[in-house]
Amino acid sequence: NAGVTQTPKFQVLKTGQSMTLQCAQDMNHEYMSWYRQDPGMGLRLIHYSVGAGITDQGEVPNGYNVSRSTTEDFPLRLLSAAPSQTSVYFCASSYLGPSPMGYTFGSGTRLTVV
Amino acid sequence: GNSVTQMEGPVTLSEEAFLTINCTYTATGYPSLFWYVQYPGEGLQLLLKATKADDKGSNKGFEATYRKETTSFHLEKGSVQVSDSAVYFCALMKAAGNKLTFGGGTRVLVKP
């Protein structure tokens, strides 16, 4: 049972480079989301999706793009990396429904922009 | 808007000590409340939850009670172990929608 798989685990980028952080889940969850974790600031929502073809912005969406072409995958794209995007990124998924079950998180991607 | 406030850490304890981590929230309506734990180098794991007032969530010796009157969801454990060293996050989810709002996290260090 894989759960939520994130790749890569570590990445170093130069300012201005672009890259895609991958996220895949095998639990048939409708809801997927991306968070960034910074010291002293907890987790902040970047983008989320309630199903294939549907995405929306969270609290800190600037500099990031997402798409959801399948239920399983929810990649996060950095268009032009900046040092302020140095962070740990977590992907999370859950079922949608009247009884909240909480999220399943991936193990994270640690990104450094130099 | 919604917000969650946790006590700042780090909290340093000796093994077998009593642990309390305070969490208060601001939200309209009746949100669901969660505690997540993050062990070093790992993602977050759901520790416990409560979905309505006066519910008590419990797991692995940890407990938290949903107090509507004080808008609180404090986490407690009666006797901590070294293996409980982690960062603990309080979070809320509104009844409508699926977005989790997190507190800033509390680092707990348990010494033998």
Image (tube, rainbow, N blue to C red):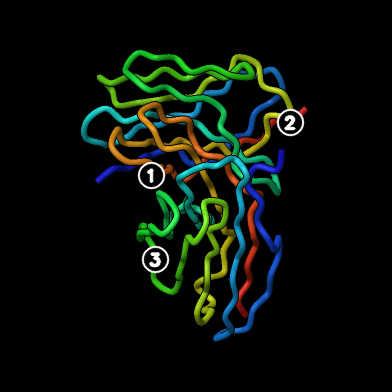
Residue position marked by numbered label 2 in the rendering:
B111
Q: Quadrant of the C terminus of chain B?
A: top right
Do the numbered discs 2 and 1 sit on residues whose CB atoms are within 8 Å?
no
How many discs appear? 3
Q: Marks 3 and 1, how far apart in space?
A: 15 Å
Q: From what the image shows, is residue B110 above or below residue A88?
A: above
Residue position marked by numbered label 3 in the rendering:
A61
| Residue drawn at point x = 26 percent, y = 36 percent | B27
| Residue drawn at point x = 28 percent, y = 21 percent | B68
Could you classify mark 1 by the number of other residues whose Cα lies within 10 Å: few (under 14), some (14-19), or many (20 or more)? some
Q: Position of residue B100 (x, y in %)?
A: 41, 42
Disc 2 versus disc 3: nearer the observer: 3
Do the numbered discs 3 and 1 sit on residues whose CB atoms are within 8 Å?
no
Q: From what the image shows, is residue B15 above or below residue A89?
A: above
Instruction: Kindly identify the amino acid type of the residue bearing the numbered disc 3.
Output: Pro
Chain letter of disc 1 in the image: B
Could you classify mark 2 by the number of other residues whose Cα lies within 10 Å: few (under 14), some (14-19), or many (20 or more)? some
Q: Position of residue B81 (x, y in %)?
A: 72, 23
Task: Report helix, strand or loop for mark 2.
Answer: strand
Q: Marks 2 and 3, how far apart in space?
A: 39 Å
Residue position marked by numbered label 1 in the rendering:
B99
Please indicate whether residue A64 sits to the left or right of residue A87 in the image. left
